[in-house]
Amino acid sequence: MAIATHGTASNYLQRAPSPSGLADVVELILDKGLVIDAYVRIAVIGIELITIDARIVIASVDTYLRFAEAVNRLDLTQTEAAGLAELRDGGGDGKAKGMVEGAKDALSGEGDRKKERAKRG
Amino acid sequence: MRVALQSPTAGGTDASAATALYLYGVTWEDVARPQPGAGVHGESVEAVPYRELAGLTSAVESTKVPAKRRDLLRHAEVLGTALVHGTVLPLRFGVVFENGTTLVEDFLLPRYAELTQLLRKFEGRVELSVKAFFREEAILAEVVRANPRITRLREATRAASDASTYPLRVELGERVAAELQERTLRDRQALLDRLSRLAVDVQVDQQPIEHQVLGASFLVERERVALFDDAMNELAQEQAERMHFKYLGPLAPHSFVGLTAEAR
């Protein structure tokens, strides 16, 4: 299998071969993957307080004040180069699917089997 | 009905009534390889074949499998190893059958047509996971420079963060949030435009995670992974000042598998 990275001198980004962190692996195998209805037990127990290291954006005064504070802390003389590398606009179509919605759908099957969701927070 | 079965448990624990069978994924029988000691709870992964399919399984003591960090990682690693040998359909963590016979009779046999069709669909294809995040200082500086109202509000509120500037600070933050949102959507689309052309399919995470520009999984032909690497390297280089990336793969097609709920 061609997993060897190529491109030597300009290798800015290394592809990781497998998920190493808990957040990555939870996203991969608790939110995604084949789910089988009816025939088997979904036997996951004890998923508690798996914290994902990500902050969901919420439109609130607290968020605004935090952004205001972050902007006011900036030293613009030290970030002169930063504004130059913006991505260009473009059209195109990526098929989009909400991961959370997908997971809910998949898990909301019928039956009396045990179901427990990973709690994110 | 011809049902070929082999013992899923190397240690001969079949006799134990408490033993159940944990299922990691489904692959072709001719590329299914045992993985000694690699499974959940350190059990060996064995193939349970049915016609040209094989379920990758290991013995578990009960039908309740705690989602421990270590076992979550093992589930992912077993699938990663299987992917080296051939195409594999990854299951979500925690699918358990009573034994090899029920695995065949309740799943591999009734879903045979669908599973073989899916395996063919993913033949020679892998999932690559991409995440891109704004570097906070750089993107905020960009926002301040680009928006004169934000520049003025910043000047007006910098000296004092007390009650007198509260309404201005709320307005400043609100405008910054709006600019960030706009840049996130615009840059997400630009990244997708660059990467989607190299992929067979793409799934985009729509959760609004702070500073995350893109969270997406790309289904890519194995022979195009090197091209995808090149594109990712170019983006990482171009955007080094204002974004950082997480790039993961090749993975089994976790984000792209799906069985229709009513199919048998």
Image: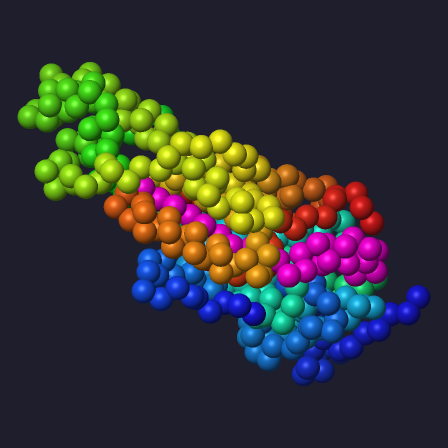
Q: Is residue B96 magenta?
A: no
Q: Residue B135 location in percent, x, y?
A: 27, 43
Q: Which residue is drawn at 71% across and 58% down?
A: B119
Q: Residue B186 location in percent, x, y?
A: 40, 32
Residue B124 visible in rendering: yes
Please indicate whether residue B230 sits to the left or right of residue B114 in the image. Answer: left
Q: Residue at x 43, y 66 (%)?
A: A5
Q: Is residue B111 above or below residue A54?
A: below
Q: In which quarter of the image is residue A21?
A: bottom left
Pick the front one: B194 or B16: B194
Q: Which residue is drawn at 91% across and 69% down?
A: B2
Q: Which residue is drawn at 70% across and 63% down?
A: B26
Q: Quadrant of the N terminus of chain B?
A: bottom right
Question: What range of the chain is rendered magenta?
Answer: B107-134
Please indicate whether residue A105 sits to the left or right of residue B180 in the image. Answer: right
Q: Is residue A106 above or below residue B6?
A: above
Q: Residue B93 location in percent, x, y?
A: 59, 57
